[in-house]
Image (tube, grey):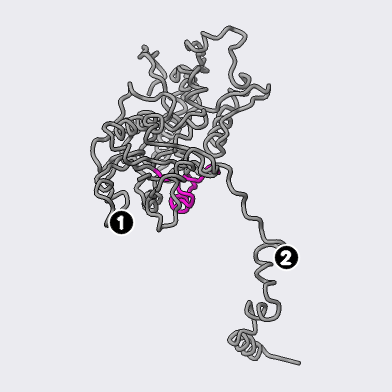
Amino acid sequence: MSMNRREFIKITGLSTLFGLAGKGAFELLRPGVLDAAEHGHGHGAPAPEEPAEAAIRWGMTIDVEKCSEPGVVERCIKACHSVHNVPDFGDTKNQVKWLWEDDYEHTFAGNENEFMADHVKALPFLCLCNHCDEPPCVRVCPTKATFRRPDGIVAMDYHRCIGCRFCMAACPYGSRSFNWFDPRDALNQKEYNMEFPTRMRGVVEKCNFCVERLAKGQMPACVEAAPQALAFGNLADPDSNVRQILRKRSSMRRKLELGSKPSVFYLV
Amino acid sequence: MYDAWKILVGLAIFLGLFTFAFWMNAGKAAPVPEVKIDTPEIKKMPEPERKCVEDKHFMRTTHMQLINHWRDQALRDGDREYVNKKGEKYVISLQNTCIKCHSNKKEFCDKCHDYAGVSPYCWDCHIVPPEEPKEEPKGNEL
């Protein structure tokens, strides 16, 4: 049978139109084969294994009422910021914050229960990076400067940060701050924690769940400063301290509706 | 050749300016730097134990690769333990391991880095222990 180009194009065009060619034809004649091939394993091969459930997922519980006791919030913030050489520029525009205090309305913006008990609405809320299980900041980082460690900590590699601030736009919790100025200008040289670096101008920074202290077997600085209000532990272990607390007490998490699965729980 | 003398004078001036850097600095080779390892922390150690994480030659030639590797290992892999060629273990940390001993940045790091014309940006973030302001030797300055 001879066929010229015009006829060939007519036939393939029409058959595509009726779903008889291309991917559609494959699906019609041998369903599932093409999809399997596209995913890199042949027909009948077992589905790729789901990654094993992580053994560690660090999380934190914050007892909101105990945080309202005088001095607790300030003590936590001071402990965190002095351990990590976080500068204080004295104004909110250039503020760099790892741990900070906010009110109910702003902490739970968008999903606030309008009939929440009055005394809860008046409480101070300690805010920090939520170390999300599905961190949106990690998805947008173009240099992989921010990444999720296997133990659930969302870490920053300041060596790789180019200061594009995509992560700041992506983070729904405002947990990230940009260094508009050299942070050393706003730090007292005599009060440096010599065991931890500062940052430089032009990088984004945030809470690191005290990863450097965990490596030494210590608790995060804020938990050490207020052990009665904060608890830190492994969410993946059903018998851990945080899981036991969460089993007994009702808790809230920030902006759950976004699906980022935060690891910081507010006990109310 | 028309205007030969103009061209020749112009060429001479051009060559003179072009090679200015060479003949200006001729015979003024910077001396090979001698780094100092007489910090209090190193002096505290008894003589036979005075050694770095790897041997002297390795550290001189490869410390930049080692530090780069340490950074990735500690920060990205979360593994903060370094096992050297002899099997000895060290904590991976620029500030808590390297600078604990080599607390004299000016006399240790800067000397060679200036000589080699490199300016690593380690110190933009990592904190250098304060050094007593010493009378800097004059010369070799711009």
Of A180 and A114, nearer the camera is A114
Number of numbered discs overlaid on the protein picture: 2
Q: Amino acid at mark 1?
A: Asn
Task: State which quadrant residue B53 falls in.
Answer: top right
Identify the residue under disc 1. Answer: A113
Task: Kindly identify which chain the residue marked by label 1 belongs to.
Answer: A
Q: Residue at x 65, y 69 (%)?
A: A35
Q: Residues within 10 Å of mark 1 (few under 14, many from 20)?
A: few
Residue B123 lies in what quarter of the image? top left
Which residue sits furthest front?
A248
Q: Say which of A83 and A34 sits in front.
A: A83
Q: Would you call the spot at circle 2 few (<14 residues within 10 Å), some (14-19), or many (20 or more)?
A: few
Instruction: Say which element carries label 1.
Output: loop
* Residue A136 among those drawn in magenta: yes
Placement of A208 over or under B141, stated as above or below: below
Residue A261: % across, % down: 45, 52
Q: Nearer the viewer, residue B83 or A100?
A: A100
Q: Chain of mark 2?
A: A
**Bounds of the magenta span?**
A129-151
- Marking on residue A42: 2
Alpha carbon of mark 1 to alpha carbon of mark 2: how far? 51 Å
Q: Which of the image's four quarters has the N terminus of chain B?
A: top left
Numbered mark located on residue A227 in the image: none
Amino acid type at image mark 2: Gly
Label 2 secondary element: loop
Q: Nearer the viewer, mark 1 or mark 2?
A: 1
Residue found at x 50% / y 32% = A214
**Pointers 1 and 2 in contact (CB under 8 A)?**
no
